[in-house]
């Protein structure tokens, strides 16, 4: 009698384990996890105008690598034109403080770009480019709530006089230095890859 009782208890336990454990899980397939949809703060046209600014900045940065002063002037002018094309009316949708901050930041970038155009010495051009880059990051990208592709802030510890650092922005982590470039009077192309990624600029 005890054997039959023990057998029934074991059988009942096994059935309960099957029913509540394995069988129920078989009939309830996992539902795929839904990722939240990220909503853009700006219109596609506004974001494209910002991407145009970035594109002209990157071309300017590449011109400094060579260095090609004619190309530097061309891309600086294109950068100025792209800044003027940003739709300020859309920025009016934000608070007065945000609008004022963005417009002042753009004005500061334009001032440095204009100064760059007035230079004849490549080192002074690079100094204006350094100032322009410092305004772009973090001021410009934070003020407009940047929504474009990931960018990188890169630092050269010896951009000027071997002891003055300067930053630039790139769309790649690869170090190609616009301050020391390919034809530096002292290093030639030996310091072309001098620099370090300091931060990333990602969509907010």
Image (cartoon, rainbow, N blue to C red):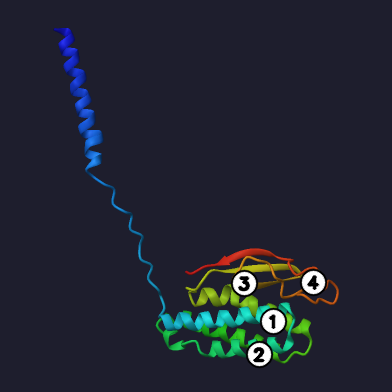
Proximity of marks 1 and 2: CB atoms separated by less than 8 Å: yes
Could you give the CA–CA distance between mark 4 and mark 2, rounded to whole angstroms? 24 Å
Q: Earlier in the sequence, mark 4 or mark 2?
A: 2
For image coordinates 58% across by 87% down, the residue present is: 107
- Image quadrant assignment for residue 21: top left
Q: Nearer the viewer, residue 26 or 140?
A: 26
Mark-to-mark CA distance, 1 and 2 = 9 Å
Residue identifier under label 1: 63
Secondary structure category for the residue under label 1 = helix
The circle drawn on residue 81 is: none
Residue 59: x, y in percent? 63, 81
Q: Give whichever of discs 4 and 1 has the lower sequence position.
A: 1
Q: Which residue is mark 3?
A: 170
Q: Residue at x 42, y 85 (%)?
A: 90
Q: Residues within 10 Å of mark 4 (few under 14, many from 20)?
A: some
Q: Can you say whether 37 is above or below 93 in the image?
A: above
Toward which corner of the image does residue 196 lie, by quadrant? bottom right
Give the left or right position of residue 158, taking residue 23 as reference: right
Q: Is the residue under label 1 in contact with that under label 4 (CB below 8 Å)? A: no
């Amino acid at each position: 009698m005890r054997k039959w009782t023990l057998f029934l208890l074991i059988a009942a336990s096994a059935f309960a384990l099957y029913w509540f454990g394995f069988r129920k899980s078989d009939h309830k397939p996992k539902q795929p996890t839904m990722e939240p949809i990220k909503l853009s703060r700006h219109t596609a046209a506004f974001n494209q105008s910002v991407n145009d600014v970035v594109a002209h900045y990157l071309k300017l940065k590449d011109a400094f690598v060579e260095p090609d002063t004619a190309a530097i002037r061309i891309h600086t002018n294109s950068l100025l034109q792209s800044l003027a094309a940003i739709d300020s009316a859309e920025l009016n949708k934000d608070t007065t403080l945000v609008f004022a901050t963005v417009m002042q930041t753009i004005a500061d970038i334009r001032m440095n770009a204009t100064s760059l155009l007035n230079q004849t010495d490549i080192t002074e051009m690079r100094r204006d480019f350094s100032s322009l880059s410092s305004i772009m990051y973090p001021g410009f990208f934070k003020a407009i709530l940047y929504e474009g592709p990931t960018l990188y802030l890169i630092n050269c510890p010896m951009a000027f006089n071997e002891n003055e650092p300067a930053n630039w922005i790139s769309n790649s982590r690869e170090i190609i230095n616009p301050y020391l470039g390919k034809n530096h009077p002292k290093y030639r192309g030996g310091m072309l890859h001098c620099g370090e990624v300091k931060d990333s600029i990602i969509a907010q």
